[in-house]
Image (spheres, rainbow, N blue to C red):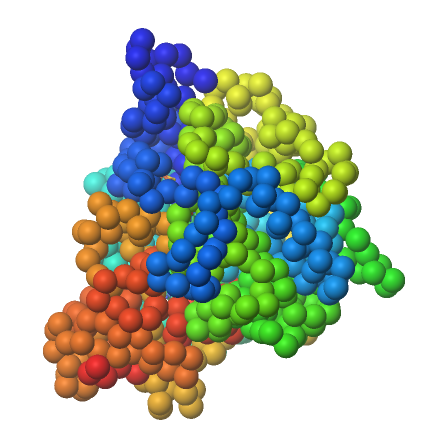
Amino acid sequence: MMPKASAERQVVRGACPHDCPDTCALENHIEAGRLVEVRGAADHSVTAGVLCTKVARYPLRVHHPERVLNPLRRRGPKGARIPAWERVSWDEALADIAARLHAICRDHGAQAILPYSYAGNMGILQYGSMDRRFFHALGASQLDRTICSSAGAAGLQVTLGSRLGMDIEAFAASDLIILWGTNPVASNLHLWSRCQEAKKRGATLIAIDPYRSLSAEKCHEWLPIRPGTDAALALAMMHVLIRDDLLDHDYIARHTVGFEALAERVAGWPPARAAEICGLPTEAIESLATRYGRTRRAAIRLNYGVQRHGGGGMAVRTIACLPALTGAWRSGAGGLLLSTSGAYPVDTVALERPDLMPRDAAGRPPRIINMSALGDALSPERVPASALTGRGSDTPVRALVVYNANPAAVAPDGNRVLAGLAREDLFTVVHEHFVTDTARYADYLLPATMQPEHVDIHRSYGHYDVLVNHRAVEPPGECIANTELFRRLARALGLDHPALAETDEALMRQALDFSHPALAHTSFEALMSRGHVRLAYPRVDGFIAPFAEGGFGTPSGRCEFYSAALAERGLDPLPSYVPPHEAAASPLAARYPLALISPPERNFMNSTFANIAELARPHGPPRLKLHPDDARARGLGDGAAVRVWNGRGEIRLTLEVTTDTRPGVATLLWGHWRDAPGTMGHVNDLTAQALTDLGGGATFYDCRVEVAAA
Ligand SMILES: Nc1nc2c(c(=O)[nH]1)N[C@H]1C(S)=C(S)[C@@H](COP(=O)(O)OP(=O)(O)OC[C@H]3O[C@@H](n4cnc5c(=O)[nH]c(N)nc54)[C@H](O)[C@@H]3O)O[C@H]1N2
Ligand SMILES: Nc1nc2c(c(=O)[nH]1)N[C@H]1C(S)=C(S)[C@@H](COP(=O)(O)OP(=O)(O)OC[C@H]3O[C@@H](n4cnc5c(=O)[nH]c(N)nc54)[C@H](O)[C@@H]3O)O[C@H]1N2
Ligand code: SF4
Ligand SMILES: [Mo]
């Protein structure tokens, strides 16, 4: 904890819990036991004293008048716009929930219970520790958490063998920065500030994005690529690099496998071929590749926009080959960054205790349900094979326990999700801060603590630091942390394994392996008192540079242009282009000619913050953005009331005609709740449950629609 700032004001160290690559170090300012201000820590180099608009105004969220402060039982119909609740005591709520879950276990088996959680809170404890232990001990279905990053993670695993990448600080020293499917002004502010430093030094910034995002408009060049075609672009870039010998032969010889096979593959990808697929000029591809090949300190900030398509895993695997061809990894200020989450020696076995899971006669643990197919998983008759990861029982889900997530607003194929949530025979428990779109369907809505009110340890997926979140204030009302909820539920259900009673302090000590080389230079105590520590990884010029000397985590220990592991699984062992499920060339495109993408709004964090009026107001109501050519072809003008539909759903809202979105692409910024002003329906009523080629990920941006006047 930090010293008292003054007699009245105390400053307590925290960490931002939101699903953001920046994982900022916070200073919570407390007066008379109340959070009055949140500042970015100045002594944490990544945060550098700066926060985004959302968290800089965090007291608005913590003290929001609509915050849920007590356990509530639903009284009216499920999904009512204004739900009716009855306040109950924790004891009563726990006893009733335990009785309901117990009856489901007895009548249908514990696999009929499904936990549904994601990254509303990214703390190692609050994201996944006591909750996993509880559901494991119960024998509930497991959840495959695929909604965000699993395709990209699988793609990186193939080529690099781990989720490691460039140091965020190194971007400031890069000479060429390619923002590939990412909008850091909105979603990665502290990387953007490094990009701006580089720009001031004379670096070139290029954005590859179907939409002229807040970041793309500040780059030197914007390449408005057709959604889901990035792999084709990368293959053509590799064609040029090899054709023109813009290669680091020494790096290739020492640290890669499969160069000959790669060269043969990309020989078939002249820029003209990619130009046709990507909807970009051939010269733009030539020039991008040449500049990339001629710049030693060339950085690619790859992000998740690229992998939310049917071929998303292969796209990441393909793009991740680029820096090994040119040897960009050698310099700290070159290489690629998608995620650093693989850097942390988190002891998940100790935290989650998979050993507590029961096994069936064949020795198999409970089935695994893919969260990106929640709509199908909630079918009343059976869980279809398409919603399962691997094989398992098809018995219907009869209880859903939601925490750290808002599936009614974030899961694809929203009409199917809502139909499932509305089932009278589904018992739903939601642990939340607010009456979200999902909470409206809850049988029990339970009050959760926010970041200043509980403890945690944080890793990051955008930098290499570990952070501590100390508790700064008493929880308001009857709010409890996720860890405490699952301790209480375990007790109520009579689950008496000692692992289910461990305190948060005990869990904190188990979270990280301090004997791992990345942490051996420090200790738990040092972390607690300093508030943050940087992991130890190889450095070049002061920046963490994980692959400067090779050291890839693949089976061969090299960057794998050729992957024997993919070949063994019967998949293409070489980088390739896998078209989107709903590609421009598919028969579906005749009926639904527009590709719809729905990246997040700047002032929201997924669907979090969308209910804070001060943050929502600047965005205004959601608007569908269409290129003037596409609007004209449909006789639509700016401000028209339109309907947007496909085979999955229909929504109504206002049109904005703008050259910020490329022809053939409709853009609808996302994060708004279902009852956003001026709209009927929600963008996720249009998105599909289809999964990615690798990693079983969600395909939010692989979605065709048609638009007409409402
Ligand atoms: N303010 C804010 N910050 C956030 C979030 C938020 O909701 N709000 N969400 C957080 C989360 S959960 C995540 S996963 C990260 C995501 O971080 P990013 O992946 O950086 O996400 P976005 O900012 O949406 O940027 C994705 C960009 O990809 C573009 N795009 C869409 N399809 C394609 C395509 O096929 N190819 C290419 N090249 N580009 C494409 C979109 O137009 C968008 O501009 O951000 C995190 N940070
Ligand atoms: N159309 C479209 N859909 C998308 C995306 C997109 O770009 N377009 N992006 C996708 C991506 S990248 C992601 S990651 C997912 C995000 O999906 P989610 O992880 O579901 O994210 P949020 O919508 O922020 O919901 C998190 C909820 O957790 C609650 N919460 C926060 N902290 C705690 C806590 O400590 N305890 C409990 N019990 N609750 C807490 C918050 O109040 C919030 O309601 O959405 C996906 N959906
Ligand atoms: S949301 Fe991101 S930028 Fe904002 S405070 Fe949290 S970690 Fe920092
Ligand atoms: Mo995400």
Q: Is residue 587 visible?
A: yes
Q: Is residue 611 left or right of residue 268?
A: left
The quadrant where ligand 3 appears is top left
**Farthest right residue in view:** 361
Residue toward you, 176 or 211: 211
Q: Is residue 304 left or right of residue 116?
A: left
Q: Residue at x 43, y 52 (%)?
A: 85
Residue toward you, 669 or 340: 669
Residue toward you, 249 or 448: 448
Locate the C terminus and report the quarter of the image it occupies: bottom left
Quarter of the image for residue 191 reads top left
Quarter of the image for residue 651 reads bottom left
Horizontal and vertical percent position of residue 78: 46, 64
Q: Give the answer, above or below, for where 268 lies relative to 56.
A: below
Horizontal and vertical percent position of residue 450: 43, 37
Horizontal and vertical percent position of residue 527: 53, 23
Q: Is residue 410 visible?
A: no
Q: Residue at x 39, y 74 (%)?
A: 686
Q: Give the answer, above or below, for where 402 lies relative to 651.
A: above
Q: Residue at x 18, y 51 (%)?
A: 618
**Farthest top residue in view:** 7
Locate the N terminus and report the quarter of the image it occupies: top left
